[in-house]
């Protein structure tokens, strides 16, 4: 058992913190594996098209850098702490 929160609980924390700032969380499958977590203004319906890190954009494009807050390998359907 780890002292660190599970990915499900981390995602819930991201959502609470985003809501306090008037934002929301959008999750998208990563092109590599896992899930990218984005924090966007709540009025934004969808994350604009973005480019994940690659040889040309080692840190992703401007949209990716502006809105991505985390990457998670897998998100469970409930707490696994």
Image (cartoon, helix red, strand yellow):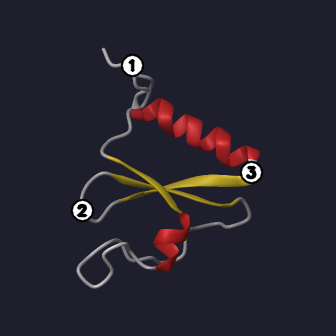
Hey, which residue is sitting farthest bottom in the picture? Answer: 56
Q: Nearer the viewer, residue 59 or 63?
A: 59
- Image quarter of the C terminus: top left
Pick whichever of labels 1 and 2 is earlier in the sequence. Answer: 1
State yes or no: discs 2 and 3 in contact (Cβ < 8 Å): no
Where 8 falls versus 1 (above or below)? below
Q: Quadrant of residue 74?
A: top left
Q: Which mark is residue 3?
A: 1
Q: Residue at x 35, y 71 (%)?
A: 52
Pick whichever of labels 1 and 3 is earlier in the sequence. Answer: 1
**Taking 43 as reference, is 39 left or right?**
left
- How far apart in space, not on screen, are marks 1 and 3 (Cα)? 27 Å
The residue wearing badge 2 is 32
Mark 1 vs mark 3: in front:
1
Q: Position of residue 71 (x, y in %)?
A: 38, 52
**Taking 64 as reference, is 20 left or right?**
right
State yes or no: discs 1 and 2 in contact (Cβ < 8 Å): no
The residue wearing badge 3 is 21
Where 79 falls versus 44 (above or below)? above
Where 52 falls versus 34 (above or below)? below
Q: Residues within 10 Å of mark 1 (few under 14, many from 20)?
A: few
Q: Position of residue 12 (x, y in %)?
A: 56, 35
């Amino acid at each position: 058992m780890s002292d660190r929160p599970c990915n499900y609980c981390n995602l819930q924390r991201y959502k609470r913190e985003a809501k306090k700032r008037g934002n929301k969380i959008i999750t998208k499958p990563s092109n590599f594996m896992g899930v990218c977590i984005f924090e966007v203004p709540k009025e934004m319906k969808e994350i604009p098209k973005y480019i994940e890190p690659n040889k040309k954009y080692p840190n992703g494009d401007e949209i990716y850098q502006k809105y991505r807050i985390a990457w998670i390998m897998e998100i469970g359907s409930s707490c696994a702490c």
